[in-house]
């Protein structure tokens, strides 16, 4: 498996790894097939994503895509962030092996979930498309908890308590 | 520091092996099929290797047929026996943790009207002789069981399995690519009819191996042609075969002991010093150079590449490292839960490794496992 130089850089020295205390929104996404799980924490001010952090249990591509998503989304408004596509991620990384493209979707999903969580907490209206994405993503996370026992659940408790 | 711990994938060619091979590229380049002195010189070299290899595996010289390596030998053993013996029956038995080339050849044979049974393994990867006994039938023509597993290193009870095959009149084949010269194996004592071996796992060159075929075994050729080696057509790879012979000659107990000591040290320290680590495979009945771990809360491909960036070669059976996005069939067969199959790491030592290299690798594994668990939010899980 060959990764681009950019992927390897983000993997070896990821940007924005960690958690945010009192985050305005937290999102989780997971892939039932490969077992990767990601969390993204966001801090929002005046509708602009001021800071993001991530935690990713997964392969090289999972870590690199999480890193680039947090970089690309920083400074974007909520609406702009919701428009980001996995194609943007793949391009920014200088390509991903075809079998790894799903990892870039996962990072986008975790960001969407963080935004969903933020909008919910703010009691704001959820765009219909985001609502549908939320249903799909949370179903996948449940699936992964089924397959990986209570492990993912413990990881979530650990991360969310820590924040 | 650069540390190569992926000898299960391939080994370097040993200096003595390379030196033995070199003249056969330019000075002694003859084709053994030629009648002149260039040809006879090549024949002598090939026969010298054949003799060495035959002796090591308890076979007669004419029972060793050179091939292009393990994949060819395994394909030939399965397909060759199946087609030559189909009048005696169409049932073949193998097991679930075989190398892909045996499993895929088996799957293909199913499309050709053969019936395959795949024996299961226990949590350590061992085949149960009682299951073989219960599965073998009147029309079973072949049983193919690898000696040492390439991923988790489990070594099967060959003699016991061989005895059962003989009692039921089935031919017995073993893929011994990972175990050859490391574990004792004898064509006659272990009641084998066919054995697959190769050179590049034992400090020989890539692209050369052999199928050991007990005299009298009916076998359809895979390649049709000039029958340069009995039953196997194709110009003989003289330099490769010379290297193969030399690699067998230099493989000795002293080197085996070195590998086993390094491997034991590696397993002991990793199990002690990396929290939530598990050994895959059998604690004792395993290849002397193989260590295979599962680490909870991290992913194997990521660990392999973090280690690679530190100059360490390793491999993994994690789903993320495969094109299918499924964990290795071996980890699944031994019943590893998904979270453990996710974080597997195989380290296979060689006799040229130094203790200081192993110590460096252990330090880096500890460091990188901690780093990955932290970034995954799993350092306290």
Image: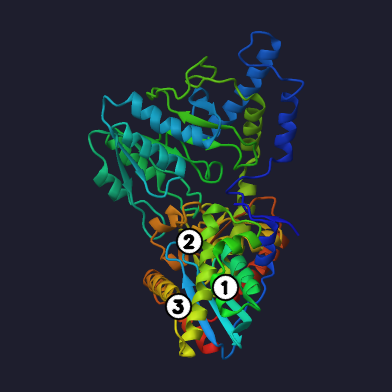
> Mark 1 or mark 2, which is nearer to you?
2
**Residue B315 position within the rendered picture, expressed as x and y whole percent measured from the top left:** 58, 55
Mark 3 element type: loop
The answer to whether one can see residue B338 in this image is yes
Q: Residue at x 48, y 30 (%)?
A: B212
Report whether B131 appears left or right of B208.
left
Question: Mark 3 — on which chain does it sit?
Answer: A
Q: CA distance from mark 3 to mark 2?
A: 48 Å
**Badge 2: few (under 14), some or many (20 or more) residues near its Cα, within 10 Å?**
many
Q: Which residue is mark 3?
A: A127
In primary-sequence order, the first of circles 1 and 2 is 1
Question: Mark 2 — on which chain does it sit?
Answer: B
Q: Which residue is mark 2?
A: B280
> Mark 1 or mark 3, which is nearer to you?
3
> Mark 3 or mark 2, which is nearer to you?
3
Report whether B64 appears left or right of B37.
left
Mark 1 element type: helix
Q: Is residue A142 above or below residue A90?
A: below
Q: Residue at x 57, y 69 (%)?
A: A84
Contact between marks 3 and 2 (CB within 8 A): the answer is no
- Residue situated in front as seen by the camera: B102 or A129: A129
Mark 2 element type: loop
Q: Are the residues under badges 1 and 2 in a single subunit?
A: yes
Contact between marks 1 and 3 (CB within 8 A): the answer is no
Classify residue A148 by image quadrant. bottom left
Q: Residue at x 39, y 30 (%)?
A: B79
| Label ID, residue B109 | none
Q: Which residue is mark 1?
A: B272
**Residue A160 position within the rendered picture, expressed as x and y whole percent measured from the top left:** 51, 86
């Amino acid at each position: 498996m060959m990764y681009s130089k950019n992927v390897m850089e983000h993997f070896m020295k990821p940007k924005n790894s960690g958690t945010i205390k009192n985050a305005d929104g937290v999102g989780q996404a997971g892939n039932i097939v490969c077992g990767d799980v990601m969390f993204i924490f966001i801090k929002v001010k005046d509708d602009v994503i001021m800071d993001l952090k991530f935690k990713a249990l997964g392969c090289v591509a999972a870590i690199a895509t999480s890193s680039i998503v947090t970089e690309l989304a920083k400074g974007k408004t909520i609406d702009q962030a919701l428009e980001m596509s996995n194609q943007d991620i793949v391009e920014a990384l200088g390509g991903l092996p075809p079998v790894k493209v799903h990892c870039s979707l996962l990072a986008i999903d975790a960001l969407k979930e963080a935004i969903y969580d933020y909008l919910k907490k703010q009691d704001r209206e959820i765009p219909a498309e985001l609502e549908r994405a939320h249903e799909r993503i949370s179903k996948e996370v449940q699936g992964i908890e089924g397959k990986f026992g209570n492990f993912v659940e413990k990881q979530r408790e650990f991360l969310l308590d820590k924040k | 520091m650069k540390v190569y711990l992926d000898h299960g994938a391939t080994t370097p060619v040993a200096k003595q092996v390379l030196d033995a091979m070199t003249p056969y590229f330019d000075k002694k380049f003859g084709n053994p099929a030629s009648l002149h002195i260039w040809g006879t010189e090549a024949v002598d070299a090939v026969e010298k290797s054949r003799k060495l290899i035959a002796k090591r595996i308890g076979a007669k010289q004419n029972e060793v047929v050179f091939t292009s390596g393990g994949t060819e030998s395994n394909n030939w053993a399965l397909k060759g026996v199946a087609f030559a013996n189909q009048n005696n029956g169409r049932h073949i038995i193998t097991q679930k943790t075989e190398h892909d080339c045996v499993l895929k050849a088996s799957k293909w044979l199913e499309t050709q009207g053969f019936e395959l049974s795949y024996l299961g393994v226990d949590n350590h990867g061992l085949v149960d002789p009682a299951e073989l006994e219960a599965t073998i039938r009147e029309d079973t023509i072949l049983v193919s069981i690898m000696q040492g597993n390439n991923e988790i290193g489990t070594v099967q009870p060959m003699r016991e399995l061989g005895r059962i095959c003989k009692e039921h009149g089935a031919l017995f084949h073993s893929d011994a690519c990972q175990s050859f010269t490391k574990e004792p194996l004898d064509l006659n004592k272990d009641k084998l009819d066919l054995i697959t071996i190769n050179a590049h796992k034992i400090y020989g060159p890539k692209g050369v191996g052999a199928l050991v075929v007990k005299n009298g075994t009916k076998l359809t050729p895979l390649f049709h042609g000039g029958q340069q080696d009995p039953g196997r057509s194709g110009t003989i790879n003289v330099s490769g075969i010379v290297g193969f012979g030399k690699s067998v000659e230099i493989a000795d107990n002293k080197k085996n002991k070195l590998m086993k000591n390094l491997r034991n040290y590696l397993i002991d320290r990793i199990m002690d010093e990396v929290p939530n680590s598990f050994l895959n495979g059998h604690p004792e009945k395993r290849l002397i150079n193989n260590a295979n771990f599962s680490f909870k809360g991290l992913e194997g491909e990521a660990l392999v590449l973090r280690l690679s960036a530190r100059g360490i070669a390793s491999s993994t059976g994690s789903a993320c490292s495969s094109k299918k996005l499924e964990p290795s069939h071996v980890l699944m067969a031994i019943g590893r839960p998904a979270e453990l199959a996710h974080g597997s790491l195989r380290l296979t030592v060689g006799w040229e490794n130094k203790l200081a290299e192993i110590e460096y690798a252990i330090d880096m594994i500890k460091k990188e496992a901690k780093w990955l668990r932290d970034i995954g939010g799993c350092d306290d899980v």
